[in-house]
């Protein structure tokens, strides 16, 4: 009897051991068909829907829509669909969270931090930029806290899929957006990389911009661009006729700004700013025409190449109403003095209110930027700001608290404009900045170089020239 019992006990142990071994083998070698595809994971998120998927070698690229509350303080009062894109590499890689602060591109692209850490990239369209706009649009719900909360909700939705560390980044208004996101949700990101982000703390105090424009570049270059600007206003009547003919041919109107003359002057007044913001410092001065001898056509075409005559038409302004609304309610906007124009200007620097349809009410809140600036100065941690030496927007920088334990950095790329990047920093700073970004992302490297090879299509660093005097 004991022999039988011992035999049965041995048999049970043997069967149990075999079963455990089989279970272990199954865990080590999962059935791939049972593993959800990344698209399935994304679309399993409540409120997420697919717009399209586009192929790109080495990645999956999705254009998505995510249901957001119009008012995060009162989620029951309506929703809208916000566009975002996901450039998927691997859930075991870090993720870079990007926004331009404007509309989102629906073509695959990779921002510099994404290349540096060889990660995934989530790109968000800023609320109220079409088509991510509630209908009807309650413009009082377009503010920096609501937009930061949009980002927070998307991060919370995607974090279970992309569980490694996240970095937030953005260029210009996008760099401002990344800063505001960190201010309101400082526990979401492992670090912030903000490019050419202006910090207009006191909207009515803009002397820093005047000082910058008085010494940027060479005196000869400054004099030449100022002379073109002045000459354009001297020839206002003839150049305005050329603008009117073009506007008629292209169907452009000027109801928002008021008149063609106001639009004409706004473009000319922006010329000096736009020249330094976007023109390549090494070659741009040589392209400025001689104001005294240039023909009307030469002057007209040159101003168009720098600023764009359609910038302040109704059609040119329509896509940027959300920006001008924010500039006139929270962000502020630069106003520069131009004494070389004498009394040629009829309107002076026109405020953002002039570029938003009158049916949209606007009231400026001076507390918003002061609050953000105060937070950055006293509470910032692992934040990096990169500026271009020739970019007027860098005249008023963010200045995070100093000290090694805070790990904050403010860097300026020599010879760079509004398209400044980490790659344009001097070699020692470039290597250190790259290493810090990688360390924040949890993929430390001693090489001081990006972890992903440069891709000429995916990593294009050229700056899309927006209307001048807009970050």
Image (tube, rainbow, N blue to C red):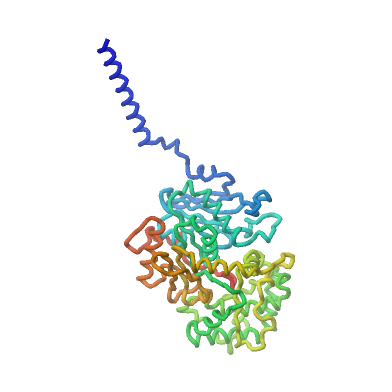
Query: x, y percentage for residue 188?
Result: 49, 55
User: Viewed as shown, does residue 157 lie left or right of 89?
Assistant: right
The quarter of the picture where residue 334 lies is bottom right
- Residue 388 in sight in this render: yes
User: In the image as oriented, which residue stretches furthest toward the top?
Assistant: 1
User: Viewed as shown, does residue 20 lie left or right of 184?
Assistant: left
Residue situated in front as seen by the camera: 42 or 282: 42
The quarter of the picture where residue 366 lies is bottom right
- Residue 250 in sight in this render: no
User: Where's the C terminus, which quadrant?
Assistant: bottom right
User: Where's the N terminus, which quadrant?
Assistant: top left
Relative to residue 40, is residue 108 depicted above or below? below
Residue situated in front as seen by the camera: 368 or 379: 379
Query: x, y percentage for residue 130?
Result: 63, 58
User: Viewed as shown, does residue 209 lie left or right of 13?
Assistant: right
Residue situated in front as seen by the camera: 442 or 303: 442
Query: x, y percentage for residue 131?
Result: 63, 56
How many numbered marks, from 0 up? 0
Residue located 45% across and 49% down the image: 163
User: Viewed as shown, does residue 258 lie left or right of 416?
Assistant: right
Query: x, y percentage for residue 411?
Result: 43, 71
User: In the image as oriented, which residue stretches furthest toward the left?
Assistant: 3
Residue located 60% across and 67% down the image: 368
Residue located 69% across and 57% down the image: 137
User: In the image as oriented, which residue stretches furthest toward the front?
Assistant: 378
Relative to residue 469, is residue 147 depicted above or below? above
Residue situated in front as seen by the camera: 190 or 412: 190
């Amino acid at each position: 009897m004991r022999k039988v019992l011992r035999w049965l006990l041995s048999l049970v142990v043997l069967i149990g051991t075999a079963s455990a071994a089989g279970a272990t083998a199954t865990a080590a070698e999962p059935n791939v068909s049972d593993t959800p595809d990344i698209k399935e994971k994304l679309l399993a998120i409540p409120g997420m829907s697919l717009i399209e998927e586009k192929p790109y070698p080495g990645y999956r690229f999705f254009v998505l829509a995510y249901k957001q509350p119009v008012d995060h303080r009162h989620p029951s009062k309506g929703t809208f669909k916000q566009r975002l894109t996901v450039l998927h590499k691997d859930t075991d890689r870090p993720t870079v969270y990007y926004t331009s602060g404007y509309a989102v591109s629906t073509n695959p692209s990779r921002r510099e931090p994404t290349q540096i850490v060889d990660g995934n990239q989530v790109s968000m369209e800023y609320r109220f930029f079409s088509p991510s706009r509630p209908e009807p649009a309650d413009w009082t719900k377009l503010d920096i806290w609501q937009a930061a909360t949009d980002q927070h909700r998307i991060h919370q939705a995607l974090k279970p899929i992309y569980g490694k560390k996240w970095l937030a980044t953005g260029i210009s208004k996008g760099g401002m957006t990344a800063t505001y996101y960190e201010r309101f949700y400082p526990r979401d990101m492992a670090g912030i990389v903000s490019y050419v982000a202006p910090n207009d703390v006191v909207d009515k105090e803009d002397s820093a911009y005047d000082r910058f424009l008085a010494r940027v570049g060479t005196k000869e270059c400054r004099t030449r661009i100022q002379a073109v600007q002045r000459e354009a206003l001297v020839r206002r009547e003839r150049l305005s006729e050329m603008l009117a003919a073009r506007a008629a041919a292209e169907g452009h109107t000027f109801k928002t700004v008021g008149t063609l003359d106001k639009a004409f002057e706004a473009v000319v007044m922006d010329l000096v700013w736009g020249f330094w913001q976007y023109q390549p410092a090494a070659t741009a001065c040589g392209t400025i025409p001689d104001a005294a001898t240039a023909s009307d056509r030469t002057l007209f075409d040159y101003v168009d190449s720098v600023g764009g005559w359609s910038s302040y038409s109704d059609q040119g302004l329509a896509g940027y109403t959300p920006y001008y609304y924010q500039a006139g309610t929270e962000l502020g906007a630069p106003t520069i003095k131009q004494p070389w124009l004498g009394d040629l200007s009829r309107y002076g620097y026109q405020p953002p209110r002039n570029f938003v349809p009158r049916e949209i009410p606007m009231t400026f809140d001076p507390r918003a930027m002061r609050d953000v600036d105060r937070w950055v100065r006293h509470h910032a941690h692992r934040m990096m700001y990169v500026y271009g030496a020739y970019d007027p927007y860098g005249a008023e920088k963010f200045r995070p608290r100093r000290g090694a334990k805070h790990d904050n950095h403010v860097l300026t790329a020599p010879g760079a404009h509004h398209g400044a990047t980490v790659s344009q920093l001097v070699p020692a700073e470039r290597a250190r900045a790259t290493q810090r970004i990688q360390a924040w992302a949890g993929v430390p490297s001693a090489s001081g170089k990006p972890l992903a090879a440069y891709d000429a299509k995916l990593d294009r660093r050229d700056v899309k020239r927006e209307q001048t005097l807009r970050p």
